[in-house]
Image (cartoon, grey):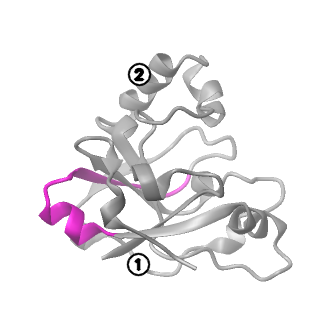
Amino acid sequence: MKLYHYAPKVNTVKKDGLLSISKINRDLKPYIHRASSDKKEDIIKWLESTFYGRSRSVSCLTETIKFKHNDPVLEKIVKASELFSFDLDELIKDGLVESIWCKNGSDEKGCNEVFYQVTPDEIDFSPLDWHKVDIKNEKLYAIIRHYMIVLKYGIIPPEYIKQEY
């Protein structure tokens, strides 16, 4: 079961793997207003209050971003990112996955999130609603249905990851 992740162009994915929030050492700005703190430990505590394991999860999509070249927000994301994929079945088989959660929308600030736990068979591969992302709301993961793979160790090791072109 192939899933996709967009990482910033400058990254260490090939060397270090896909890292969860608990493992990264980068700017956590998207979470500051929700956690009411800029301290990583407070952000992790807030993440864990939404569902157990969220701080050890990696967000992923069921398809690559689809956009017409007149969509500046999606184009900006694609141009600023590298696309990686991984096989969820392999991660599960090797005992790396603890749980899977779906987030299917929130308000425009990324708050009032709705999560529900799913099994691998319940992952929805129907087309995503890319038209919902617009210039006033650049928060892709606040709008588009995606999955959060909770990892036992907070990382998808590089040997499980494929760079897409």
- Residue hosting label 2: 45
The spot of residue 63 in percent (x, y) is: 50, 76
Secondary element at image label 1: loop
The answer to which image quadrant residue 7 occupies is bottom right
106 horizontally vs 20: left or right? right
Q: Nearer the viewer, residue 88 or 158?
A: 158
71 horizontally vs 22: left or right? right
First-in-chain label (2 vs 1): 2
Residue at 72%, 60% (x, y): give it.
Answer: 80
What is the distance, in whole Å, between disc 2 and disc 1 at their CAs? 31 Å
Question: Residues in magenta?
Answer: 87-105
The spot of residue 107 in percent (x, y) is: 63, 46
- Residue hosting label 1: 125
145 horizontally vs 99: left or right? right
Residue at 71%, 62% (x, y): give it.
Answer: 77
Q: Is residue 94 magenta?
A: yes
Q: Nearer the viewer, residue 55 or 46?
A: 55
Secondary element at image label 2: helix
Q: Name the amino acid type tagged 1.
A: Phe
Residue at 55%, 16% (x, y): give it.
Answer: 39
Q: Name the amino acid type tagged 2.
A: Lys
